[in-house]
Image (spheres, rainbow, N blue to C red):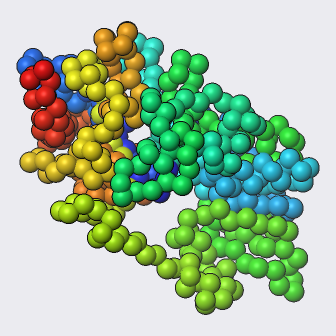
């Protein structure tokens, strides 16, 4: 993601294998809509709501059952940086151990496939990182040259990447932003690239991957140990000659011995967090708030009405959807029409799919509170367990926010 943690709603497939795609990572929310009602604009009740706050996706391969006493090179954290580093070490012929705290791989990249819509159909959503510019040598070179994965422009018109970000945001790349797709041109999931690296890591014969091993402490070498001592929540320890810690700030600062062995100046630098939002970045009367997380939300509709009724297949609503519209339901709405995957029988006909209804740091609790806890960021709400009518409220908020678009359509 270009913005860090976020949140989303999406349909959840609990049958995913332990090392197949699974849930975990940035804050997100997805809502599924089935059974349209008569009349406008109240059709399409929502039947499923999912919220995510962090994404990590499972790797293909076999989990190691026992930790080794020693590793030449140890990488802690199975996100992009950790997996790529471990891959490069293994590629050089050296042995490497990759430790991941969860049962999944991907870090802040979370791709999830949902079996919704018509029988046999599936839709893949990215809750975490989801697009890149080929100008970015990492991950661009890995995806396009090493793994040779198919990609398609994120925006159908393939604009300059710098133009894709609405003011006041700025992006220092020019090649159009793209995302990984499948043979049908539908989003395949950004984690596909990380899974590809893990496959190569395991196939090299020089790499091992250990899941469910949360690092609890690390200590630098002293007179009695020749390497870095890594201690895990399982109570086991590993000595490594070389270590890379690919961890979030809070996890890194939470390693007591390593923190005590680190100079005060470096610790203070690691603790420093400042978000600077100059008021002159925004138009008069426009304001961006920073909530507790970056949250992303989708709604699934059996009829993708933004295609079939409004002919809206590209663009945002409002103009800068990152600054959402406040509604009388108390639910902020910011729509990106071409973000979620949509299947159509033919253009604008027989369409069903996911609509991104929120992606922002705006202060809100409707989407974010669906997550069970920070370590399990995917929250699910279905029509069968929605006694307070949250799904209906969300749909009402979406219809209210898009009211001007319905008026334009009726006028034309």
399 or 237, nearer to the observer: 399
Side of 19 relative to 7 (left or right)? right
Q: Which image quarter: residue 216?
A: bottom right
Disc tally is 0
Q: Is residue 249 visible?
A: yes
> What residue is at 66 percent from the left and 30 percent from the top?
149
Q: What residue do we see at 15% from left, 24% from top?
A: 409
**Furthest residue toward right:** 93
- Residue depicted at x 87% and y 53%: 95
Residue 110 in sight: no
**Spot occupied by residue 140 in the image (x, y as percentages of width and height):** 66, 43
* Horizontal and vertical percent position of residue 366: 23, 50
Residue 349 found in image quarter: top left
Residue 27 location, x and y as percent?
Answer: 40, 51
Looking at the rendered image, the quarter that the C terminus falls into is top left
Q: Position of residue 239 (x, y in %)?
A: 81, 68
Location of residue 282 with respect to 147 vertically, above or below: below
Q: What is the quadrant of residue 394 in the picture?
A: top left
Q: Nearer the viewer, residue 63 or 357?
A: 357
Quick check: 258 left or right of 163? right
Q: Nearer the viewer, residue 22 or 94?
A: 94
**Image position of 272 (left or right of 286):** right
**Residue, x 59% and y 19% (percent of image)?**
183
Q: Nearer the viewer, residue 97 or 200?
A: 200
Left or right of 110 in this view: 351: left
């Amino acid at each position: 993601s270009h913005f860090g943690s976020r949140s989303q709603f999406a349909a959840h497939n609990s049958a995913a294998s332990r090392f197949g795609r699974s849930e975990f990572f940035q804050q997100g929310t997805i809502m599924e809509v089935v059974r349209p009602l008569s009349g406008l604009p109240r059709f399409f009740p929502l039947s499923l709501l999912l919220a995510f706050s962090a994404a990590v996706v499972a790797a293909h391969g076999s989990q190691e059952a026992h930790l080794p006493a020693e590793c030449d090179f140890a990488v802690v954290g199975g996100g992009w940086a950790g997996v790529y580093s471990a891959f490069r070490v293994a590629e050089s012929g050296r042995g490497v151990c990759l430790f991941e705290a969860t049962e999944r791989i991907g870090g802040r990249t979370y791709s999830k496939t949902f079996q919704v819509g018509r029988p046999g159909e599936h839709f893949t959503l990215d809750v975490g990182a989801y697009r890149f510019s080929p100008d970015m040598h990492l991950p661009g070179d890995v995806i396009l040259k090493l793994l040779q994965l198919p990609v398609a422009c994120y925006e159908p018109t393939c604009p300059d990447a710098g133009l894709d970000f609405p003011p006041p945001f700025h992006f220092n790349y020019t090649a159009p932003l793209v995302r990984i797709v499948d043979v049908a041109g539908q989003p395949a999931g950004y984690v596909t690239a990380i899974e590809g690296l893990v496959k190569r890591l395991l196939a090299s014969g020089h790499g091992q991957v250990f899941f469910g091993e949360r690092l609890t402490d690390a200590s630098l070498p002293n007179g009695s140990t020749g390497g870095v001592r890594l201690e895990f929540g399982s109570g086991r320890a590993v000595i490594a000659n070389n270590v890379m810690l690919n961890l979030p700030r809070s996890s890194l600062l939470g390693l007591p011995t390593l923190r005590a062995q680190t100079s005060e100046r470096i610790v203070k630098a690691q603790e420093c967090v400042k978000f600077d939002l100059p008021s002159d970045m925004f138009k008069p009367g426009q304001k961006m708030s920073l909530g507790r997380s970056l949250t992303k939300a989708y709604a699934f509709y059996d009829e993708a009405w933004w295609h079939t009724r409004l002919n809206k297949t590209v663009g945002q609503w409002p103009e800068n959807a990152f600054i959402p519209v406040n509604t009388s339901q108390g639910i902020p709405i910011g729509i990106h029409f071409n973000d979620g995957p949509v299947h159509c029988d033919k253009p604008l006909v027989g369409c069903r799919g996911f609509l991104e209804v929120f992606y922002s740091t705006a202060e809100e609790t409707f989407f974010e509170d669906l997550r069970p806890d920070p370590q399990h960021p995917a929250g699910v709400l279905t029509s069968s367990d929605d006694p307070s009518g949250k799904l209906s409220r969300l749909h009402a908020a979406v219809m209210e926010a898009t009211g001007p678009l319905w008026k334009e359509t009726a006028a034309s």
